[in-house]
Amino acid sequence: PPVRFKNRHNRSQPPLHHTVLVCSRGRGMVFASSSIRGLALVAMGAMMGLQTAEAFARSPSPRAMLIRASSAAIAETDGGGNNDDSSMAANAASPAIISSTNPFLPLLSKGLHRTSIAMHRATSDRVFKSTPSLSRLRKQVQQLTDISPSSIGDHAGLGLFATKNIKAGTVVGLYPAHALGYELVVPLDEGGEMDEDNLQDLSMFLAENEEDEKYFSDHPHGNSPYLHATDQPLFQRPSLLSSLFDEAKDEMAPPLYLDVNPNRNEELDGIWTSHFINDGASLLDMQNSGTSIEDEIERYYTQSTKEKNCIHIPFGPSPVLATVTTKKVKKGQELFTSYGVVYWLGAVDTLPEEEESTPRMNERIQTQIVQSARDLQKAMEETKRGYATEMEDLEKVLVEL
């Protein structure tokens, strides 16, 4: 039976029923998923012939991490719940405190530090004036867009608009990161054997500084409209956490996410504007439509795909994301991407609880998910060809910081 999970409003929410996707790449591969989100990861992983989230869950690395976490990384509070490391913002859903012995922390901290230098006006010249290609990239991007109230309506806040005609395949912004976190759920060790039915959530986030820690404490990542995956199998680049895992043993780093503190927008260099881009469709009016959840999901994908003219992709080293146009954008048009059905199902307050109302995967929804993965793959390949020098220079500069 499908497993229920919590949405961004900490409310029990039904996923899609258990679904199996078969994909061939020389040999047949079968992957299973029990949620929309899982199926999206499975579809993208299977397309690329890579391990999926479920393959990761069965690999040796979670077991090793569980042992490591049990012995060192997870420390019980002393009754007061105090955290000795003020720079850490642990997952609000987890009662455990992550100690500074967690091997992931130095890697996340290094990634945040490098990205911070590149993001902030006061220090960004160290990156974008370091090579002719990066200087040219920043100048071009800053001339292409402007931030104004979204054309969707007041509820959408600000949006990003083209200030001139933009051709497809053009980088129009970079995605800021004020927090980085990973998602890791592992089976508990019961007497030397892993209990697959009893899982422990070791996921956590690291904030850049105390100001960001306070913001994310008041605005949990599960509720964030800016939360975005920055490393996953489809991205085909080394994660910040890759050094802790052995690919030869089929170990795979957990998915990595970034989040944004919008209170610090004024501090950002003008190239870091991707978080202003809205989705051209939503599921917020689903409860008033009178149609089934499946029909609304199909409607969302159809409308969002129609409006989408850009996509967020990996750009150079982890955790940097760029936004690249997928079609020609005329002067004055708003830039739209697709947040995906997972985001919008989490944003809906009143999904029905009844089992018969659980959304079911159908062929049309599955086709939309796979097409989204293909769009992402195509954009990444084209950007690697068109911006090879910029991506190489950015990686060199950030590594040297």
Image (cartoon, rainbow, N blue to C red):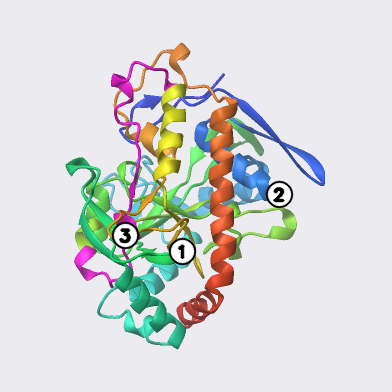
Q: Residue at x 54, y 58 (%)?
A: 379
20, 86: nearer the viewer: 20
Q: Amino acid at mark 1?
A: Pro
Residue at the spot of label 2: 49
Decide if residue 392 is in sight here: yes
Q: Secondary structure at mark 1?
A: loop
Residue at the spot of label 1: 319
Q: Residue at x 45, y 23 (%)?
A: 295
Q: Position of residue 251 (x, y in %)?
A: 67, 53
Q: Amino acid at mark 3?
A: Asp
140, 81: nearer the viewer: 140
Relative to 229, is 81 on the left or the right?
left
Relative to 183, is 91 on the left or the right?
left
Q: Which residues are magenta?
A: 265-293
Q: Secondary structure at mark 2?
A: loop
Up/down of 139 relative to 18, above or below:
below
Are there few (<14), some (14-19), or many (20+) residues within 10 Å of tag 2? some
Q: Position of residue 67 (x, y in %)?
A: 58, 49
